[in-house]
Amino acid sequence: MEYTIGKGARCAVIGHGSWATAIVKVLCENESRVGWYVRNPEVLESLRTRGRNPRYLRDAEFDPSRIAPSGDLDEVIREADILILATPSAYLKKFLEPLTASFDGKFVISAIKGIVPDDYTTIVEYLHTRYDLPYDRLGIVTGPSHAEEVALERLSYLTVVSTDLMNARRIGEKLSTPYIKLSYSTDLYGVEYATVLKNIYAMAVGMAVGLGYGDNFLAVLISNSAREMDRYLSESHPAERNTCASAYLGDLLVTCYSVYSRNRRLGLLIGHGCTVKSALNEMTMVAEGYFAADCIRHVNTRHRVEMPIAEMVYDVLYRGVAVRRAMEALIEKLV
């Protein structure tokens, strides 16, 4: 029997970082009350008493009567019908560790643009395998949408992905605001892997900027990245998809160019001469591309798709290849 989201479905967000905070802000535009699982005691107390997250998007103010922050994961899950996961991928297991409540009857959405380290799976694949969630109860929210701009109510576009477009539209109703425009897709595999790959390519762009390459070269690097993404998706999971759409190309572009991009910043630090370890220590938030580079290389041993840009990033991060030497070798492979 196919799963259908009810019109009165209640929403909850898992995570308390910048993207989780931005999503709660958007939901509060349409929902009378939004559940919110917050592990950090300081953040939890501040949300309850002041309606603000003291660590991320501090200027975003919440009406305390519209949010239900809680440190009890089971309580949050029991009270919701739609669960939106918005934690760094590296910490997903830790966030879900206290879980004893069931996901039965819930629709679970990944707003995580990463991959589960060590398991070498995307978030949707992990939830399907670990919690026996059927794919018709799993979805994705993505798009070229940095949390900082969403919090400032700057016009942004989100793509909601579900195997059932009716469910995708039901979720979209809860995210629709004057500053959020929506599109819909059934391409769970392609959209999710695109969100993983774009972080790797943004690191490559950051490295190039740090090394002193100009806009002409960056245009070539990004256009080659777009083709590499399309090639990987087409060969690993053939389907009808338009990788020029915002969920694919748009997300790639904003992650490569934006000053808010963590992955671009990590690459920039390495390009400027930081060691990988020191660059990671400089980061105040998680750069998903670091884990993605290892995971994609592992997953690609099954598909054997030609991916010179992703390979270059892996070589720098995990093999200790000097970034300038790696970039110079890559240049000869670009068109």
Image: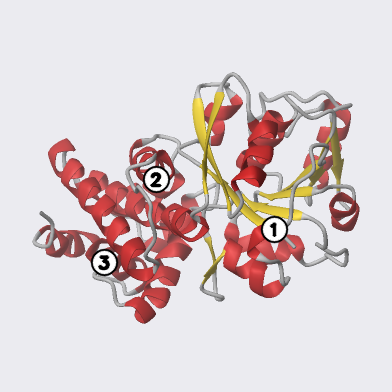
Disc 2 packing (10 Å; few <14; some 14–19; many ≥20): many
Tag 3 residue: 307
Q: Residues within 10 Å of mark 3 (few under 14, many from 20)?
A: some
Q: Identify the residue at horizontal 33%, vertical 68% (top origin).
A: 314
Q: Quadrant of the C terminus?
A: bottom left
In front: label 3 or label 1: 1
The type of residue carrying mark 2 is Arg
Tell me the element at label 2: helix
**In the depicted structure, whether residue 239 falls above or below residue 38:** below
Measure the C-alpha gap from mark 1 to mark 2.
35 Å
**Among the two numbered marks 3 and 2 on one chain, the one whose residue lies closer to the N terminus:** 2
Q: Position of residue 324 (x, y in %)?
A: 19, 59
Residue found at x 38% / y 38%: 254
Q: Say which residue label 2 marks.
A: 265
Mark 1 or mark 2: which comes first in sequence? 1
The residue positioned 42% from the left and 49% from the top of the image is: 263
Q: Name the residue tied to disc 1.
A: 137
* Residue in front for this viewpoint, 80 or 89: 80
Q: CA distance from mark 3 to mark 2?
A: 22 Å
Is 227 or 5 nearer to us in this picture?
5
Q: How far separated are the C-alphas under marks 3 and 1?
A: 32 Å
In the rendered image, is residue 272 in sight?
no
Nearer to me, 245 or 266: 245
**Position of the N terminus by quadrant:** bottom right
